[in-house]
Image (tube, rainbow, N blue to C red):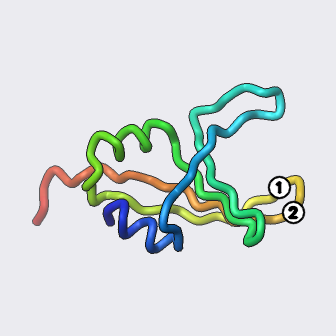
Amino acid sequence: MNLSELKFKLGHESLNFNTVVTSTGEQTMWMKQWDNTNRIAVLIHKDTLAKIRATPNMASLDFKETVKQGAQGEYTARTIVAYAEAEETL
């Protein structure tokens, strides 16, 4: 799916990411949008974000959903992924 389809599937008109910072204050290569009301985190690696920026119409996006344990209890983590385009199609 492309970015517009992905945002629709995630239920967001826009995705507003902030860099994830460790408990020691170090910035990571991950960015996150947090919905505290529904306890849902949308995550993206900075390399994936760069690929999307370079090719806004790429059609190989999806997300993986997992339930994680946080300091305030369980939350849903939705990680955006970009799959490699197929080299051959049969």
Q: Residues within 10 Å of mark 1 (few under 14, many from 20)?
A: few
Q: Position of residue 56 (x, y in %)?
A: 29, 50
Please name the amino acid that badge 2 sits on. Answer: Gly
For numbered disc 1, what is the local secondary structure? strand
Query: Which residue, given by chain and number where applicable, does mark 1 sit on?
Result: 70
Q: In this rendering, is residue 66 above or below 86?
A: below
Q: Position of residue 58 (x, y in %)?
A: 27, 54
For numbered disc 2, what is the local secondary structure? strand
Q: CA distance from mark 1 to mark 2?
A: 5 Å
Q: In this rendering, is residue 25 above or below 17?
A: above
Q: Residue at x 52, y 68 (%)?
A: 12
Q: Residues within 10 Å of mark 2 (few under 14, many from 20)?
A: few
**Left or right: where 68 falls relative to 45:** right
Q: Position of residue 52 (x, y in %)?
A: 35, 46
Q: Residue at x 75, y 66 (%)?
A: 39
**Left or right: where 4 falls relative to 57:** right
Q: Residue at x 59, y 40 (%)?
A: 30
Q: In this rendering, is residue 84 above or below 62?
A: above
Please name the amino acid that badge 1 sits on. Answer: Gly
Query: Which residue, given by chain and number where applicable, does mark 2 sit on?
Result: 73
**Left or right: where 9 falls relative to 88:** right
Q: In this rendering, is residue 13 above or below 32?
A: below
Q: Position of residue 8 (x, y in %)?
A: 44, 73
Q: Residue at x 27, y 60 (%)?
A: 59
> Are dots 1 and 2 in contact, CB under 8 Å?
yes
Q: Quadrant of residue 75?
A: bottom right
